Amino acid sequence: MGILEMLGKKTSLPSPADALKGRPDALATADIHFVNKHRLQGPYPEGSETAVFGLGCFWGAERVFWQLYGVHVTAVGYAGGPTPNPTYHEVCSGMTGHNEVVLVVYDPKKISYEALLKTFFEAHDPTQGMRQGNDIGTQYRSGIYVANDVQRQAAVAAKATYEQALKKRGYGAVTTEIVDAPAFYFAEDYHQQYLAKNPRGYCGLGGTGISCPIGVGVAGG
């Protein structure tokens, strides 16, 4: 057992057999986005698309995306592990396998998926493995959870391009996982748009300061 595990900060994912069992019913969460007043769980406007990202503590991560033009609504939640409908405390235990993630519902006619990827990579350090700054644990890993093959191809290309840019500046390999979008479980009400409700709240998010050189063109339609 490593020192981080001894301190209660798990840096390896549990097996499905060892993961917490969770519960059959969804947790109660907000109905309306605190900032833009759009419906958090839909229905979303026709033509909307979704993206899911994990990039450290989801409080600061969500704020990065709700500020973008073309984003209809954002929500924080849990994804990537086998435990159904986990609580925040269960996720923090490291025994659900889940990541803290942000659901981004956006208009592809106003903002491209590539622009979201650029924002994602520049908002955190994707080389840190199971941590982000002082936030340590499997729930803080860098992840892109793709909805289709188009998103997967864009994510893989962006990861490779940014890794080259980072290596030129002395960084190691990008550890971002790119997997098919798993079930998304909405986090509890008090986590939604947390930094809008608590402007002086904690945000441990910090990027490398290095630009991600990928296309940011807006999709036509």
Image (cartoon, grey):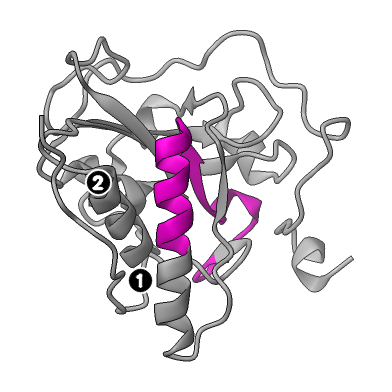
Label 1: state its secondary structure: loop
In the rendered view, would you say 208 is above or below 199? below
146 lies left or right of 85: left
Residue 187 seen by the camera: yes
Pointer 1 local density, CA inside 10 Å: few below 14, some 14–19, many at least 20: some
Relative to the observer, which residue lies in front, 148 or 17? 148
Q: Position of residue 82 (x, y in %)?
A: 71, 29
Q: Position of residue 115 (x, y in %)?
A: 23, 52
Q: Which amino acid lies under the numbered mark 2 shown in the image of this protein? A: Phe
The C terminus, quarter of image: top left
49 lies left or right of 167: left
Residue to which mark 1 is pinned: 207
**What span is in magenta?**
132-159
- Whichever of labels 1 and 2 marks the residue nearer the N terminus, that label is 2
Q: Which mark is residue 185?
A: none
- Residue 201 occupies which quadrant of the picture? bottom left
Residue depicted at x 61% and y 26%: 86
Residue 56 seen by the camera: no
Relative to the observer, which residue lies in front, 172 or 25? 172
Residue depicted at x 30% and y 79%: 209
Residue depicted at x 77% and y 29%: 20
Q: Which amino acid lies under the numbered mark 1 shown in the image of this protein? A: Gly
In the rendered view, would you say 176 is above or below 78? below
In the rendered view, would you say 85 is above or below 80? above
Check if residue 12 falls in the magenta segment: no
Distance Cα–Cα, label 1 vs label 2? 14 Å
In the rendered view, would you say 21 is above or below 16? above
Q: Position of residue 166 (x, y in %)?
A: 43, 80
Q: Position of residue 199 (x, y in %)?
A: 20, 51
Relative to the observer, which residue lies in front, 77 or 176? 176
Q: Which mark is residue 65?
A: 2
